Amino acid sequence: ILMRAEALNVVNTFAPSDVVMVTYPEALCERVLNRTALVESALQVRVGDEPSMEVVVDQLEDYGFERVAYVGEPGQYAVRGGILDVFSYAHDFPHRLEFFGDQVESIRVFEPGTQLSIRVSDKISLIPDIRAYKLQEERVSALEYLAPQSLVFVGDVRAAVADLNKTYQKACDAYLGVKEETGGQTLRSSP
């Protein structure tokens, strides 16, 4: 989930024609937030910006982030004085935002186990858990993030087709299970 959110966030920052996506067949079957919803759900924070810490914390709460004493997992944040630690779903490591008044003074990436800085950053994109956030939004294939003229290379077509068929069969079995549980009623999506 973390890698998918991070990949979509990175892909979304480039022109579709400049993207190389390496993935596995099942990932292409899963539906992801459409590009518009991803952009709308991301909170961009840069050094020098003036969103008060309260505004950022309110947004994190809206995203469903959990307030903890020390961050260790995606979806958590911690507040200590003028410091906001946040572990976004779009990054491998948490970020430490230092505020001076209402201005973001610095952003650093840090190791949660040691609390030591790894590198300095000038911006962060805070993204919620894309599995749960805005579930009502239209979902699309990850291929929608690529340009129409993109080339797709498949290492082993037979294995890819077998994997896709297995995933399709699981979906069919799940549908039949739900249909049995509902007494044969067919499921309809609302318009």
Image (cartoon, rainbow, N blue to C red):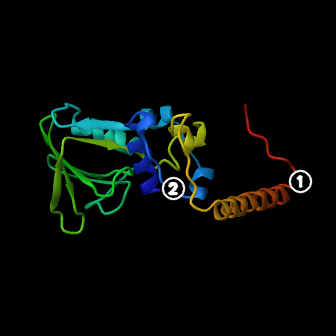
Q: Is residue 119 left or right of residue 141?
A: left
The foreground one among 167 and 181 is 167
Mark 1: few/some/many CA within 10 Å (<14, 14-19, 20+): few
Up/down of 80 relative to 136, above or below: below
- Whether residue 137 sits left or right of residue 50 in the image: it is right
Q: Is residue 83 left or right of residue 86?
A: left
Q: Which image quadrant for residue 148?
A: top right
Q: Nearer the viewer, residue 38 or 87?
A: 38
| Quarter occupied by residue 180 | bottom right
The residue that mark 1 highlights is: 184
**Residue at 22% over, 63% down:** 111
Question: x and y percent of residue 68 in the render?
Answer: 30, 58
Q: Residues within 10 Å of mark 2 (few under 14, many from 20)?
A: few
Q: Position of residue 5 (x, y in %)?
A: 44, 49
Which amino acid type corresponds to the residue marked 1 in the rendered image? Answer: Gly
**Mark 1 or mark 2: whose residue is earlier in sequence:** 2
Query: Foreground: 100 or 44?
Result: 44
Left or right, 92 with reference to 138? left
Residue 46 at least partly seen: yes
Q: Residue at x 68, y 58 (%)?
A: 164
Tag 1, which secondary structure?
A: loop
* Residue 30, horizontal then vertical, whole percent: 60, 51
Amino acid marked by disc 2:
Thr
SS category of the residue bearing label 2: loop
What residue is rendered at 57% in x and 36% in y? Answer: 137
Mark 1 or 2: the one toward you: 2
Q: Is residue 135 visible?
A: no
Residue 74: percent from the left, percent from the top? 37, 57
Image mark for residue 3? none
- Please name the residue that numbered disc 2 is placed on: 23
Does residue 107 lie above or below 101 as drawn? below
